[in-house]
Amino acid sequence: MRSIVIIAVLVGLGGILFISGCNFNNSVVGLDEQVSKAWSDVQSEYQRRADLIPNLVSTVKGAAGFEQETLTAVTEARAKATSINIDPSNITPEQMKAFQEAQAGLSSSLGRLLVVSENYPELKANANFRDLQVQLEGTENRIKVARNDFNEVVTTYNTKIRKFPGSLFASILGFDRKTQFEAQEGAQNAPKVEF
């Protein structure tokens, strides 16, 4: 009689552990899919920006005497930024850093392009150029929102796999922490603006 009770308790505990493990696995798989979707949204917004650049460059090329070096820098930065592909299920800190550096290089080149364009009144008066500037600004805002959404989902995922008892199941089932977007080095310092 006593052995039957012990066996029943062990089977019950095993069943509870199994069901808990299944629920945890399903929950984390759902979060992992949300991370993948959020990463796809981030990439989609960066792709939108990359798609705007050829139009911006061709519009700027029409300005007589525009600095070729600036246009070349933008084109090269775009090529570098679009060449980095990351698997959302296995984003390493190194991959994220390389991706962010490439995107920062592109942002910097675009910033230089827009600053240099201030020296060309006929370019500033061009309706296509103004429209592209507005689209680019809107895209930068969309990128920020997509990055924030990605970080939010990654935080939820990472919290889930680090809390007890989820951390036990995560280590058994092979779920690892995901990497978030972080501010670029020096971003905490206000930029110096000189007139």
Image (spheres, grey):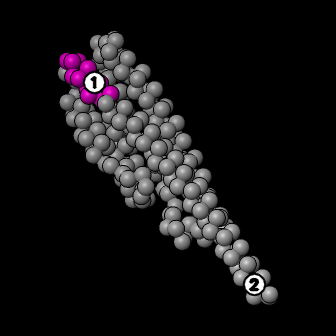
Q: Which mark is residue 4?
A: 2
For badge 1, the amino acid type reads: Asn
Tell me which residue sits at (57%, 46%) in the image. 152
Q: Which mark is residue 163?
A: none
Q: Position of residue 147 (x, y in %)?
A: 49, 42
Q: Position of residue 186 (x, y in %)?
A: 48, 49
Instruction: Give left or right: position of 158 versus 11.
Output: left
Instruction: Give left or right: position of 71 versus 156.
Output: left
For badge 2, the amino acid type reads: Ile
The answer, for residue 100, to whether it is visible in the render is yes
Of residues 166 and 54, the one drawn nearer to the viewer in this rendering: 166
Which residues lie in the magenta part?
A: 52-64
Of residues 17 and 168, the one drawn nearer to the viewer in this rendering: 17
Tell me which residue sits at (48%, 56%) in the image. 179
Tell me which residue sits at (38%, 56%) in the image. 95
Q: Position of residue 87 (x, y in %)?
A: 38, 53
Q: Position of residue 77 (x, y in %)?
A: 28, 41
Tell me which residue sits at (20%, 30%) in the image. 68
Lower position in the chain sequence, tag 2 or tag 1: 2
User: Quick check: 165 above or below 100?
Assistant: below
Q: How many badges with numbers are in the image?
A: 2
Residue 140: say if magenta.
no
The answer, for residue 77, to whether it is visible in the render is no
Q: Secondary structure at mark 2?
A: helix
The residue pinned by badge 1 equals 55
